[in-house]
Amino acid sequence: MKIAYLILAHKYPTQLLRLIQGLQTNKTSFFIHVDRKTEDAIYNQIVHQLQVIDNVKFINRNRCFWGHFNLVKATLEGIQSIISSGVDFDYAILLSGQDYLIKSTTYIEDFFSQNQGKQFLEFFPIASPNKWTNNRGHYQAFKRIYHWHFRFRNKHFYLPLKRNFPKGFEPYGGSQWWCLSRECLEYINTTVLQNPSLVDYFKYVLIPDEIFFQTLILNSPFKENVINDDLRYTDWENPNPNVPATLVKKDFEKLANSSKLFARKFDMNRDAEILELLDRKLL
């Protein structure tokens, strides 16, 4: 089971290196996107630390702001890089630089071997009651996708005029993160290249990284093989200091008892001991 990891990073070079070393096997490859907003000193440290690892490739950098289409763009360019690289892979997994594995690499490989052909991501139809339905203001589910949203750098502009969603597609939402088969990744890449108007529509959607891939996949031939699970342990209930919570030493038992493969998010500057515990006792 060969796995290509697409990692979106913007800080913490040492933590990113640790993540890659933890995932490293002779069946893995890594495609790294470093936010163009990242300071040169941090970017140079990331490149310096990773350049000696043969199966690491850096992809074109985008300036990524929260809720901005460039997060989708960076991910799509990462997908295209994986496919065009000629790297042999069975699954692709999207991670952030602050994720970490909570199952061994052998367990992860066995899991995808046993579930080959299945796609893993969180999803829900926007038209049905969901966790965004009762959000306030322009964060309400329909307003996210059926009205106009513009961003200039980190400023958001909202225009409450109705838009017509791309014909033939039903909108879905969910978590940004996913684990997808090679066949599904190739389908996404082909569909995007053949439907530029679909991509353009999402440039004016609010937080499109939580809608774009769900919409493509749940309107595709892969729909029947999608498992509603992004395989991440994430704590949205206990802010530390915000949500999702930064996971620390006291969270170890929850992580140890989780059925998930990965967890987010971690911050070695706040608590490096949790990663030591995971390495020593789980991995």
Image (spheres, helix red, strand yellow):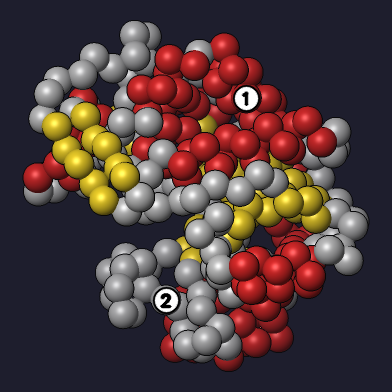
Q: On residue 158, which mark appears? A: none
Amino acid type at mark 1: Asn
Residue 105 lies in quadrant = bottom right
Label 2 sits on a secondary structure element that is loop
The residue beneath circle 1 is 189
Q: Which residue is mark 2?
A: 246
Q: Nearer the viewer, residue 246 or 55?
A: 55
Vertical arrangement, residue 179 with respect to residue 241, above or below:
above
**Please, is residue 50 above or below residue 60 in the view?**
below
Q: Does 154 sit left or right of 9 as displayed? A: left
Secondary element under disc 1, as helix, strand or loop, is: helix
Q: Is residue 178 left or right of residue 170?
A: right
- Residue type, numbered disc 2: Thr
- 161 lies above or below 255: above
Q: Residue at x 58, y 25 (%)?
A: 188
Earlier in the chain: of badge 1 and badge 2, it is 1
* Separation of marks 1 and 2 at Cα, in angstroms: 33 Å
Screen quadrant of the N terminus: top right
Quadrant of image for the C terminus:
bottom right
